[in-house]
Image (cartoon, rainbow, N blue to C red):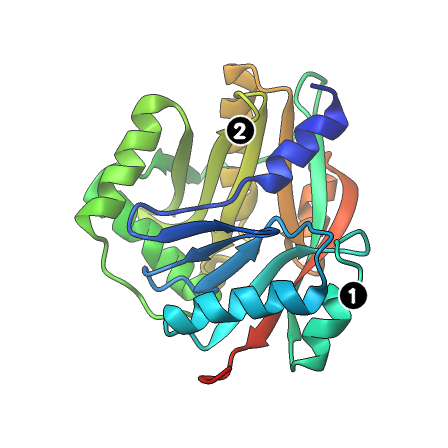
Amino acid sequence: MNVDQLIRAASASFWVPPESEHLRADGFDIVRYDNGFVYDTGVYNVDSERPATALIADAEAIAREWQRPALYWHGLSARTRPAALVDALLSRGAEEKERLAVLVLDLTAARPDLEAPVDITTEPAVERRQVEDFRAVESAAFETPLQPVTDEQLAERRRAATDGSGEYLVGYLDGRPVSTGGTSYVAGGAVAKLWGGATDPSARGRGAYRAVLDARLRAAAERGCRLAFVEGRVSTSAPILRRAGFTVYDEVFMLRQPVTADA
């Protein structure tokens, strides 16, 4: 694959936890998240020649069946097909919730020294305590309710570490969990797709995000990945990622569309 193909492959991948339901509909993927994930009904990989109203109606029907009050349409851009989709969603009361820069880093070339602070240590989240620490940091960073770790989620973390499909890292400052980051290895292992970068507000400005980022990039390079891929919030993580050597490839956004109880 060339670089453009690798980026498209990474963009098309998304998270489906073991306890969630995933459907491939005509023109989009949809996932029901049952683990407290804030974007609890995600629509991905929208690409169709069908009318926008038809796609929306299909997605709304699934959301109603799942008894969900909203749909979160991910990865939208000026190139989304059908072209009328975004305007149709906005006319239904959709609001932009997130705007992300799509950033890539060539892992076969030299990269800048991130100057990760030595007082931040990182550990893989494979034991229950570490997975609970991961969830606690996410809860503090994104201001969401802290959810208990299930046996299925713990098994997923261990399976990813064992089969090499991904990893979850926790950064610790003086023994306290303060930062997180995940990696999924996609496109046949050629791309390290980074996600879940978060820092406890009480530890921001201490370099915890950089420390976990540096650990993930080193691990990806050691595995022989050609490219690192990440979607970073335009106003927060994207500037840090650019300083780390990433270049902006694209920009996408996510809309939250309310779904009424009746069609």
State left or right for residue 34 relative to residue 51.
left
The secondary element bearing badge 2 is classed as: strand
Relative depth, front residue between 243 and 221 = 221
Q: Residue drawn at (52%, 45%), measured in percent from left and top? A: 195
Q: Quadrant of the N terminus?
A: top right
The secondary element bearing badge 1 is classed as: loop
Q: Position of residue 170 (x, y in %)?
A: 38, 43
Relative depth, front residue between 121 and 152 = 152
Q: Which mark is residue 63?
A: none
Q: Residue drawn at (51%, 48%), measured in percent from left and top? A: 197
Q: Is residue 243 above or below residue 201?
A: above
State left or right for residue 139 relative to residue 219.
left
Residue 10 visible at all: yes
Q: Residue drawn at (39%, 57%), measured in percent from left and top? A: 137
Question: Which residue in the structure is indicated by mark 1?
Answer: 84
Question: Which residue in the structure is indicated by mark 2?
Answer: 186
Q: Within 10 Å of the Cα at label 2, are there few (<14), some (14-19), or many (20+) other Cα atoms? A: many
Q: Is residue 248 above or below residue 187?
A: below
Q: Position of residue 3 (x, y in %)?
A: 74, 25
Q: Position of residue 25 (x, y in %)?
A: 52, 52
- Please state which amino acid type lies under the numbered disc 2: Val
